[in-house]
Image: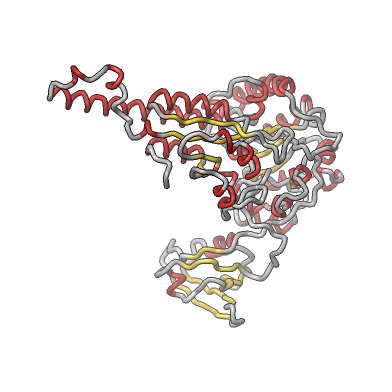
Amino acid sequence: MYEFAVAPAITQLRRPGVLISEVSPESLADELELAPNDRIVRVNGRVVRDYLDFRFQTAGETDLLLQVKKPNGETWEIEVEREEGEDFGLMFEQIVPRQCANECLFCFCKGNPADARPSLFVRDEDIRLSFLYGNYTTLSSITDDEMKRIVEQRLSPQYVSVHATDLKTRAYLLGVDEKRADIFGKLNTLLENDIEIHAQVVLCPTINDGLQLEKTLRDLASHYPKVVSTAVVPVALTRYNTDERLTRVTPEFCRRTIGEVEKLQKEFRKNLGVTFAFLGDEIYIKAGLPIPSRKHYGNYPQIEDGVGMIRSFTNSFEKLLKKLANRQNAETQNFVAANVRTHQLAIVPKNQKSEVGNRKLNSLHGTILTGEMFAPILSEQIQRVNALINSKLKVRAVPNVYFGGDVAVAGLLTGKDYLAVRGQIEGDFVVIPKHTIKSDEPILLDGMQFDELQAQFNVPIYALDTEDLIRQILAGDFRE
Ligand code: SF4
């Protein structure tokens, strides 16, 4: 899975301590004369490696001794007395991710064009990012110290790419020997220490599907509730993945997998009370079958992995449509009441009475760009909005030419892909999916700067996620 939110590790050196990036004015840290570029190297004599260590070592402590390295080389010892729970007012550098030591058959790095941004080739495998952001790790190169750290600092839950519980199959998929692929001792240690696990299977036809998948899901479910859930997501191959051992996912394969997994889901719901094993949205869309209900997904434990996103989106959109309808009704009633008083209602044409509400909203005229997979679903909802408020919002599916192959998700669209559909833009603005812009820098996956993209369009471009989109439609205005 692409990790698009962390800085690449390549050029960064590991120095002792954790670097302060910001100090809030008039905070405790400000009072202690801590400043950006200081490094906190020890707390109460214990070494600090990153901000998770700092958080762990200061949690619940009111009397602290900080050892701080100043940029001029001085070392300060700072005694701190603070109120219980008092925040320091500090922001820290991002965590530099550890790299994996695998050679997965389907690794996304092998699916990148040769000229892709260097950060797309970063193979992060870091239990800290797993805890913080839900990034998956394989645990295959985890050290004893990291295992201890997960348990000691309660870095729970952890997100683990299991792929297959059959060792030979797992080793084959990871491209490592069986000794390295064997993580079941480690998994047991984590489970025995009450660390929760969310598992993932990247489903590769003919390798870990069918009976292999059934075995994997049953093995994992036997550890429920400590293994909380398992996501089964289809392998996505770009046009650069040419490894002959991999088979592309077809609609027929998806239909068969849904049939097989549904039987297990039924069994898990009966025995465990939860669905436990969830199929990625893409599998239902490719199969041409309906997305399961809200109830199927429980509290959406694997939504960040593309599991239940569509159901969550359509439910949010239903709420939006209700709000718009209620608002329209209320405004229509106000209008009617005002005009009854002045006896003008009789001369208002019937069609105008239904349009009096949402006057501001119905001026919305713009184009929403998204991936080919999500476009039909979004388009259906947007048409309902248009019918309700007389807006002119259009959805355009953007083919992913940059990565090509099976890639049809919105999150992997690039600047070049947007430029290719420039001629299809209608209205006063364009919306693109927010996740196609790097979270900490205005740059797209193919390295194009956002400003560069904007300069090629005659109308403003807004990068929004679906929640933002709903908010903006309700506000009736896409300007910030
Ligand atoms: S664990 Fe596998 S898929 Fe993930 S970065 Fe490493 S090689 Fe790639």
Percent position of residue 122, x then y: 72, 53
Give the image's coloring scheme: secondary structure
Does residue 430 lie above or below 207 as drawn?
below
Residue 51, quarter of picture: bottom right
Residue 407 visible in the picture: yes
Percent position of residue 465, x then y: 51, 40
Q: What residue is at 40 percent from the left and 70 percent from the top?
A: 26
Does residue 318 lie above or below 432 as drawn?
above
Does residue 249 lie above or below 458 as drawn?
above
The answer to whether 37 appears left or right of 317 in the picture is right
- For the view shown, which residue lies furthest in the left direction? 342
Q: What residue is at 44 percent from the left and 61 percent from the top?
A: 85
The answer to whether 31 appears left or right of 358 in the picture is right
Q: What residue is at 67 percent from the left and 32 percent from the top?
A: 221
Q: What residue is at 59 percent from the left and 82 percent from the top?
A: 74
Residue 125 visible in the picture: no
The answer to whether 389 appears left or right of 35 in the picture is left
Residue 73, quarter of picture: bottom right
Q: Nearer the viewer, residue 7 or 56?
A: 7
For the N terminus, give its image quadrant: top right
Percent position of residue 436, x then y: 60, 44
